[in-house]
Amino acid sequence: MSSELVVDVQPKEISTALLENNRLVELQKEAQNISFSVGDIYLGKVKKLMPGLNAAFVDVGYEKDAFLHYLDLGTQFNSCAKFLKQSLADTKRTLNLSKFNLLPDIEKEGTVNDILKPGQEVLVQIAKEPISSKGPRLTAEISFAGRFLVLIPFSDKVSISQKIKSSEERMRLKQLIQSIRPRNFGVIVRTVAEGKRVAELNNELKTLVKCWEDSLVKLQKAKLPSLIFEETGRTVGVLRDIFSPSFENIYVNDQEAYQQIYNYVSLIAPERKDIVKLYQGALPIFDNFAITKQIKSSFGKTVSFKSGAYLIIEHTEALHVIDVNSGNRSKAATNQESNALDVNLNAAEEIARQLRLRDMGGIIVIDFIDMMEAEHRQKLYDRMRELMSKDRARHNILPLSKFGLMQITRQRVRPALDITTSEDCPVCHGKGIIPPSILFTDRLEDKIHYLVFKLKVRKFTLHVHPYIAAYINQGVFSLKWKWKCKYTFRFRLIPDQSLALLDYKFFDAEKNEIDLKEEIEIK
């Protein structure tokens, strides 16, 4: 299986698409300069205690207080609190954690009132991003994630990924890490560390320890509440978690992001750095790799898949509901049971993809087509488990209930990705009445005339819907040829799949948008 990563950098957001065999399986959109991402470390203040929930609300600078449960404090919270207090009290020197004497673990069955006090300063990490009306979910067990290792201050444990099955390799890695890790630092060895040499692991360990030391320096200068450590960008984070030899290409359309990703790949896999490529094509990068079309067909309430069958996906506050419908399949079917099994197996494949694509977390309930045979129900359950094995998020799948429902829980750390696939009419703006569509190209020509002769812009790019672009380009003496002859030869026409049918955008030579829309067009 070949994999490709496509990164689209825009002024307001960065979109990352993962393709497997040219099929979109993961999509992440992150606003530029986003805050409160998973992995970010904050210096916060306890606002109030909730004994009934055995939890506390902590001010980390978000509009709503963040939630910190007693079980998320970590066994070494007392040591962390003492170290934090000493660090803030003496800002002239940076404490060395390796020389610090750890305190005994907190009780597993204790209460938050015994550990925390209102107004207390705490060092916390974002475990779950703000979702809907809820603030962030926190953990006081600080960690720094790398590609091969996860560093955990205030711990002495070395854990090996359960996915590493070889007992000899597990023993080798454990002994290796024990010999190189600093005192009072725990380490989790990730699956990709299997077979790696000591030099590679040692270099990453030093990098993670440096992140901790830099955070301490920033901590001593911080004011409440304050960001102490910011997790690497989600694009680099995706690479860190999923980079594999199956990656054939990584395409980026921004020079700065390209350099960042190139440097990271050069660090973790120097022999594969040439797979990172700067995209400089005229078409939008997602259009060039047929991603825009896949997004429009894969999101929304209704999702079609093989042979006319389709899914209905509903998102609620409490859970996600997926209904499987056979559609036109039922008309041609000769055997109801075999038809139901075939549709359900195909639906399982699409559902597994949809969970990754939309990053749906929490409780997912799937209403499959009823099947009477126990063998068929078991086959569907086994198939779903097989398909979900590729999912990096922690999940649990229950067998079909007697009502034909399958329940899935999936790790939820950020809001589910929801993309509106329906398009607002750019001409009528919901009024249902438009100017004569045959005059659309005449209006475009008027705007080109204004751009060239009034604004004195001689080099520009016009983005329109592919259907409109085909009309403008048709014939030997096309409209595009006439406009070039009449106004400027430094004019480019780009078909853009993200635009609605009668929408358009002008860009200057530096790719900055030129707003030429009249007041009536933007109401």
Image (tube, rainbow, N blue to C red):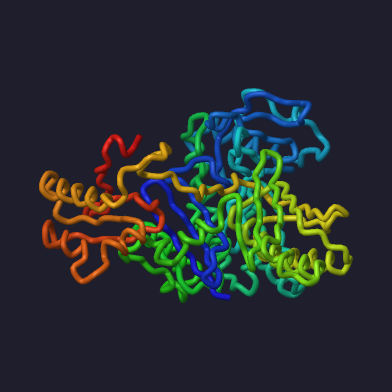
- Which residue: 74% across, 43% down? 75
Q: Quadrant of the C terminus?
A: top left
Residue 411 appears left or right of 2 = right
Residue 110 appears left or right of 211 = right
Residue 289 appears left or right of 342 = left
At which x and y percent is residue 331? Answer: 71, 66
| Figure label count | 0
At which x and y percent is residue 292? Answer: 46, 59
- Which residue: 69% across, 47% down? 320
The vertical placement of 211 against 433, above or below, is below
- Which residue: 85% across, 54% down? 401
Q: Nearer the viewer, residue 111 or 308?
A: 308
Q: Nearer the viewer, residue 71 or 209?
A: 71
The vertical placement of 459 against 435, above or below, is below
At which x and y percent is residue 476? Answer: 20, 71
- Which residue: 89% across, 65% down? 374
- Residue 187 seen in the figure: no
At which x and y percent is residue 221? Answer: 46, 34
Q: Nearer the viewer, residue 285 or 64?
A: 285
- Residue 456 seen in the figure: yes
Q: Nearer the viewer, residue 105 or 437?
A: 437
Q: Quadrant of the N terminus?
A: bottom right
User: Which quadrant of the structure image shows residue 147?
Assistant: bottom right
